[in-house]
Image (cartoon, helix red, strand yellow):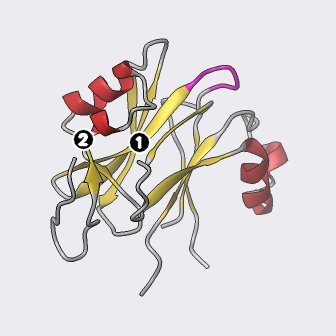
Amino acid sequence: MSQMRIYPLLTLPLACFITSAQAQVVSQDSPKHYRLPQEFLFAPHAVVAALQDRGCQIPQYDRSPAPNNLVARHFLAPASTDWAALCSRAGVSTLLVLHGPTWHDLDSVAAAPDLPGHGIFVAAPEWIRQRVGSVRADSLDPPITHDGVETEPAAAP
């Protein structure tokens, strides 16, 4: 079972849980596949442009032909649509959250060395409340009313 850490965010009310292009190889311990932002055809142009401007490559957590590690959901408020991405530069992936009316506002949440099998997933409010039940999620201030991002590290060999 993987360990869960909660990263408090001072600049946005995102509940973030961290549990610890072309194919290219950076090192033996790095993801084997990366995608360029423009390969995410489902993402709005402004999101793609913001990731390109930062020189991001998106590490892929599996060999699925579908692009992954770029997700949209309601991360700041129930009515907002925000985007979260793993942005890899120089062997380090940073969890970025793009928000605002045109997704030009950006928060950098956490960074770690690229790992094979590392992925981000949407965590619904109900799931977050269950996961943090031991810390009495009902008493959290502010209450959890929107989605969060969970990252999963690679499975141990």
Tell me the number on the disc at residue 56. Answer: 2
Q: Is 98 left, or right, of 31 in this rendering?
A: right
Work out whether residue 35 or residue 5 is closer to the camera in this orientation and state it: 35
Q: Amino acid at mark 1?
A: Ala
Q: Along the polypeptide, which appears first: circle 2 or circle 1?
A: 2
Residue at the spot x=48%, y=30% of the render? 11
- Helix, strand, or loop for circle 2? loop
Residue 141 place in picture, x, y as percent: 73, 36
Q: Residue furthest right?
A: 138
Work out whether residue 45 or residue 124 is closer to the camera in this orientation and state it: 45
Residue at the spot x=81%, y=54% of the render? 136
User: Looking at the magenta stretch, what is its main secondary structure?
Assistant: loop
Q: Is 154 left, or right, of 27 in this rendering?
A: right
From what the image shows, is residue 47 above or below residue 143? above
Residue at the spot x=71%, y=44% of the render? 124
Q: Based on the picture, tell me whether residue 145 belongs to the magenta stretch.
A: no
Q: Amino acid at mark 2?
A: Cys
- Helix, strand, or loop for circle 1? strand
Marks 2 & 1, CB-CB < 8 Å contact: yes
Please give the residue where the numbered disc 1 appears in the rendered image: 85
Q: Kindly report the distance in space between the C-alpha atoms of the residues bearing marks 2 and 1.
A: 9 Å
Residue 157 place in picture, x, y as percent: 42, 87
Quarter of the view holding residue 41: top left
Residue 146 place in picture, x, y as percent: 69, 34
**Residue range highlighted in magenta:** 77-81
Which quarter of the rendered picture does the N terminus lie within? bottom right
